[in-house]
Amino acid sequence: MFRNNYDNDSVTFSPQGRIFQVEYAQEAVKQGSVVVGIVSKTHAVLAALKRNAEELSSYQKKIIPIDSHYGVALAGLASDARVLSNFMKQQSLASRLTYDRPILLSEITHRIGDRAQTNTQHYGKRPYGVGLLIAGVDAKGPHLFEFQPSGVTQEMVACGIGARSQMARTYLERNLEQFEGASREELVKHALKALKESLSQDKELTVDNTSVGVGGVKEDFRLYEGQEISGWLETTFENTNTAPEPEAGEGMEVDS
Amino acid sequence: MNHLPQAWGRPRDDIYGAYNHSHLAPGQPTTHTKSPIVTGTSVIALKFRDGVVIAADNLASYGSLARFTDVKRLRKFNDKAVLGFGGDVSDMQYLDRHLNALAVRENYSSGSGAGEKASSTSAEASEEERAESLDNEGAGTGMAANNLHKYLQKLLYRRRSDFNPLWNHILIAGLSTPDPKVPDATPQPFLKSVDLLGTAFGAPSLATGFGAHLAQPILRRVVPDEEAVKKIDEKTAVEAVRECMKVLWYRDARSLDRYSLAIVTGEGVRLSEDERVEGQSWEFAEGIRGYGTQVV
Amino acid sequence: MAAIFTGAPPNSGPGYSFTQTPAPTSASEPRQHAFYPYTDNGGSTLGISSSNFTILAGDTRSTSGYNINTRYAPKLFHIDSADPSSRLVLSVVGFAADGEALAERLDTVVKMYRYQHGKTISVGAAAQRLSHVLYGKRFFPYYVHAILGGLDEEGKGALYSYDPVGSYEREQCRAAGAAASLIMPFLDNQVNYKNQYVAGSGVGHELQQRDPRPLERKEVEELVRDAFTSAVERHIEVGDGLQMMVITKEGVEEVYRELKKD
């Protein structure tokens, strides 16, 4: 039976120059439900599809507000995201306490990038199994950053990660031109439409399985869930039934 | 050569006497600065409509000895902040080096490279747009005076809590970052102080050392409150500060008639390090009786 | 030589609440130069709680000895003001740098509580946590007298006062700081009706204590103003401005009034 000799740890390259543990971690991101982020000149928006592991369980937490000026959306291992978001929370508080300023999104993204990278270079450690979208507004304006388990970070105009996120990205690429000048409402609609693209045929976005996070110039980052987003869902998908619809997680694989 | 390696590189006992090991007593508690040695006297500063003016003389005293007469006690941090140091000069120089390192770090993290806004139209972005985006970044980032003040307050408070104080009283003058919640907010004049205990406070006018007794009453007549700050212009503020430097030169024995003066406005920092107290008149001294050799 | 370079003020100088200079030693002994990490920045605070609100107040003067550092240095801190449902206000008086450090510590604690539990901390929990924060520095204390105000789970006004090492108690009213000894008896009399008796109830043991009642907001604001205008007259470290924070179920309202600047 075939056995890969180069995937036992994250410090050994394969002869092809690959680090399998890191690639496996990136697979973990693809198992997580889809999250989407977009920025305009004035706003940064996150939208996420929440899963419930079983009918009787609650839905996952997909968007975490970190500081009053930004939040993150996660795809992959939620527990790894918690470790990272706790770190981000502490760094953000420290920035306000010692410098009297909100931390720059580029700065906090680099810091988690550096942390993730060390996990890929030390024996006995494992990479984070989570991808993040970091969105909000800082002194340089609205931003969206993508974070990957490899430690790679990049600034994006629009981005989608997680299961079937290629469909969302295709939507975002097609509508790229409209984002920069979009209003707050238009941006949320684009994010929800992109999210919808990634859903399987029999699925709908409902107030239960959707989260939206919005931050803007002169507007704190805030998480919107439940009935707060029914208006957006109604206007975005006119034919959608927004009444709480029992979600069985049918036809979708269960998150780890 | 002495064949005992332990003796190499040490002063010879037969010439210099046995080494006094009490200077390097292990197990003794570590000791820190418990008093300043070479000191600078007052720093004074005053807010006006569009900025702040700050001044300090160029003297560093060794006790009552006017030891160094060309020491610059004002330090420009960037286009938005100037510091004025009173107290120990060596601690000032330590802070100067520390702040240089901080400035370098800041320029790396807030420079145009890292975190530059990705633009969906970057391919066809015109030169004009690029220039504009760089300008905006300059305006919104980098440490403003309030950021620097918070940092120094934390630093000095930490050092006092470690019983290893930096023996300075520092004025931080400049412009603050505008409140992000207020529409069209502009940078405001900023003036606050922090001392060796980490005590921090701001006011329309501030003075450290002897200036707190001699200059502050004069400055408070010019700007009694924040309302008055909005009414006075740069010229009035600079005149008041020059007048105070003269009073200090007359009445503070640890002062000098050569001083540095900096003005921080939206246009940047104008720092001059060779100002002189002009129009001196010592006639008032004739009338003083009862000190020194004067007996009548 | 050493005697020349003492950074401390002369022994005959202004009387500080904390000793800034070491006790004079006899001429033969070497002079000790100790660094004293505290100072007193003067000022006074008070808090009064009632049936559905709490008021905290403090003057805004900051002093060093006989100098006024500034006429506006707030002693009241709205804790976690980013949270719209926050109803916590901390007042600190004593050593201002410790006071600000304490307020920031509590602010961080309350923010982390909200982040980790997904809800706003109750005033009772915050009060106990503050006690632990203070006691944590039992052997290098925050040199402040803190008063924490808020609304309890029943919506009643809550007020907790602390000593510098964390001993605390819930009270109806408390004055702290430089003019505490001037204000506290006034509050005892006017808030808890101490030494007020029902007219005609008799003499000696027959005397009936007048029963305290919850005060109206307007009454309390007037009491606070009276307390401070009187303290300004009699204490040199109190004056310049009066900062008040009124905590109701609607939110935390800040009121500023001028005091005499002499």
Image: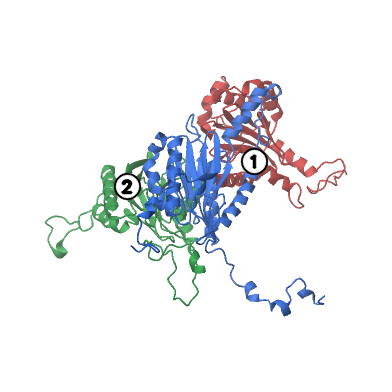
Chain letter tied to red: A
Same chain shared by disc 2 and disc 1: no
Q: Nearer the viewer, residue B230 or A30?
A: B230
Relative to C91, is B257 on the left or the right?
A: right
Please state the chain letter of the residue tagged with numbered disc 1 in the rendered image.
B
Q: Colour of chain B?
A: blue
Instruction: Tell me the CA gap for discs 2 and 1.
Output: 44 Å
Residue type, label 2 = Lys
Question: For mark 2, what is the residue?
Answer: C261
Q: Residue at x 34, y 51 (%)?
A: C47
Choose top left, top right, bottom left or bottom right for residue B62.
bottom right
Question: For mark 1, what is the residue?
Answer: B107
Q: Please, is residue A234 above or below residue A5 in the view?
A: above
Relative to C77, is A231 on the left or the right?
A: right
- Residue C133 shows in this picture: yes
Figure colour scheme:
by chain
Residue found farthest to the bottom: B14
